[in-house]
Image (spheres, rainbow, N blue to C red):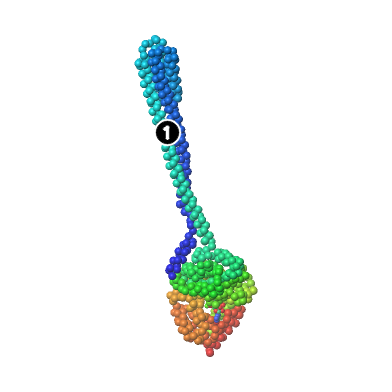
Amino acid sequence: MPAERDRIRSHRRGATRPAVTTRADRPRSLILTSLLATVLLGLCGGTLYGNLRATRAADAHRTSLAVDSLFAQARDAVTLEESHLRRYRVEPADPVRVAFVRAAGAVNAALEQAGRRGDPKALRAARRLLTEQRAYREAGDRLIDGSARTDPAGDGPYRTLQSDVDAVSRTYGGAAADQADRLFQTQRRTVFGTVVGFTIGMTLVAMIWRLVLGYQRRLLANVAASQRLALHDFLTGLPNRALFGRRLQDVVDAARADPSRRLALMVLDLNGFKAVNDTLGHQAGDQLLEVAGQRLRDAVRDVDMVARLGGDEFAVVLPDVDNVGQVRLIAERINEVLRSDFQVAAGPAAVSASIGVVTGPTDAGADDLIRHADTAMYRAKARGGGVAYYDARTDREVPDRMSLFGELRALLDAGDPWVELGLYYQPQVRLSDGTVSSVEALVRWHHPGRGLLMPDEFLPLAEARGLEIRLTYHLLDAAVEQAAAWYLGGSPRVVAVNVSPRCLVDDDFVARVIAAIDGAGLPPRLLRLEISENGMMNDSQRALAALHEIHDQGVQLSIDDYGTGFSSLEQLKRIPADELKIDRSFVRDIVTDAGDQVLVRSTVAVAHAVGLLAVAEGVEDLAALTVLADLGCDFAQGYATSPAVAAADVPAACRQAEQRARRSAAA
Ligand code: C2E
Ligand code: CA
Ligand code: CA
């Protein structure tokens, strides 16, 4: 059994965990995007800067090259100038002189241009060389016109010029090579920076992409999870009523399209589930529902759909069945698995199922199928559980439960203006002297269309769908008013009112009871609240506190249907009750069944031991009254003395009950 629960737990984890986008993702994506922007900006700036530097370096390089070539030209022209001068000395002809002058002009032109193109340093060098050239030229001119006999080549001016122009030219040659080197370095750095920046950028893009894809994936998972939540029951993970309705409609449509297809629908309700909730608590009830859901799923085929319609109500859609035998087999299996004991944290729990089955093909729509299965289910429930198959002939008479529930709710909403809900009162006789001092109020519904309805026909509906608290309060007010009327009329009677167990944990319960007696002016001792054994044993501290509070006000309390629950003597002692009503199933055969006599005797002993009066209910014949008196019972109630009657007939019914009781005692 623990394995059964573990499986369910793991299934619930899977079913309900929604994929959430983490908050940490958001700052991460922000950081990544800012990083990417920074890197891109850096890349842009770096590339621009690199290009600028490269352009500048290229310019400088070009200038250096030009200056270098101009100084080289000047140096070559100086050499030419000198060679012409040397030749003139050997061959003093005009053309040689002209060539010398042209070469000197070329030196000037090259140096002037180098001064203009180059940087200030080049300008200074050019000016110095021009001065030296001028000196050399003057020496040459002097040689040519014969005013000087010395050879200027052998002299200082030429050597100075020659070596200076050489040095300058070499310097600028080196500078140009340096510039070229620098240009190359700059270009290499720019390319390297660009590649690194690009790589980082691409990595960031990939990271952002991954993040975005992650978002997207989680978003899709979220959508899927919320879709699942909307269509599934949180507790059991089974499809809910909405999904069930869709699936059934699909199956009905498919069956209509293909008349050879057979389908079946089962609606089931757990018997005794309320008792589990009331005695073991809601948590135990939830655990039982989970396990029941799992067992149902295991009991059907893969193609079948099990859904939880709400509360302890489930449905199974069988879309494709071979024959009725197969449906029967599955229904019986479901019946079996739900009957075997449930092990919940609070202890063992037992329920059974009422299963209504309808099979197709049928002209009926999905709604009709549900109604038919529902009707069959109620027939099964009326029989005490098991499987019932819808039969159009027998089930036609059964009132439609859903609409009956709707009518009851509307009636309570309107405050029951025509008093359709009426209370009947059944006298309770004291066995020692045959007197009647109290009556039990029992509800009847005078339904305008359906006639007189007994509690069994509508109370289970109210209890299954959460209307029983309002109904109880409504009837409590009516009973208290009637009790007050008898009291004020001079014939006080204790009126016993049946209270639905769930009222005990309702916040308004104590206040409603006190308001009812205060409002009607009824002494509290004339009201007795009957709560079933199962409801009383609800261990909730709240329920116990409510009972104590009411009892302290003077209101009497009675434990109803005793023997049908599982209360211990220990629990019994804790309840502030005044009387204990032995369930009619132990009383029915009391005259003939020795076993029941033993049970009743011991129950009476238990009641007396904890200070309670013992009441036998469902006493149908007068002989039983004598037996019960012998067994030590204090009170008796049943058809033997009087059925429940309308308020107006109560005085007569009480007189009749007293007469019968006395007659039986005398006999
Ligand atoms: P209960 O509290 O055990 O009420 C006694 C039931 O036994 C009544 O059925 C009564 O008519 C029936 N009864 C009385 N004498 C005999 C007898 O000699 N033999 C047999 N076989 N039955 C007898 P009823 O009125 O149909 O009520 C059924 C149940 O409905 C009640 O069982 C009670 O649990 C619930 N109920 C009735 N009236 C109210 C009400 O006003 N409020 C609430 N919350 N529940 C009510
Ligand atoms: Ca009762
Ligand atoms: Ca009872």
What residue occupies the far front of the structure in this picture? 91
Query: Of 230 and 624, which appears nearest the observer?
Result: 230
Q: What residue do we see at 45% from left, 65% from top?
A: 9
Q: What residue do we see at 36% from left, 18% from top?
A: 159
Location of residue 49 with respect to 541 vertically, above or below: above
Location of residue 185 with respect to 261 vertically, above or below: above
Q: In the rendered image, which residue does mark 1 sit on?
A: 183
Across and down, in percent, residue 348 comes to 45, 72
Does residue 6 appear to the left or right of 517 in the view shown? left
Label 1 secondary element = helix
Q: How many marks?
A: 1
Query: Of 480 and 403, which appears nearest the observer?
Result: 403
What residue occupies the far top of the structure in this picture? 147
Residue 554 appears in view: no
Location of residue 328 with respect to 137 vertically, above or below: below
Residue 4 appears in view: yes
Q: What residue do we see at 54% from left, 85% from top?
A: 621
Q: What residue do we see at 57% from left, 70% from top?
A: 263
Does residue 406 appear to the left or right of 541 in the view shown? right
Across and down, in percent, residue 323 comes to 56, 73
Across and down, in percent, residue 551 comes to 49, 73
Across and down, in percent, residue 128 comes to 40, 20
Query: Of 4 and 651, which appears nearest the observer?
Result: 4
The residue under label 1 is which amino acid type?
Leu
Residue 653 picture quarter: bottom right
Quadrant where the N terminus is found in the figure = bottom left
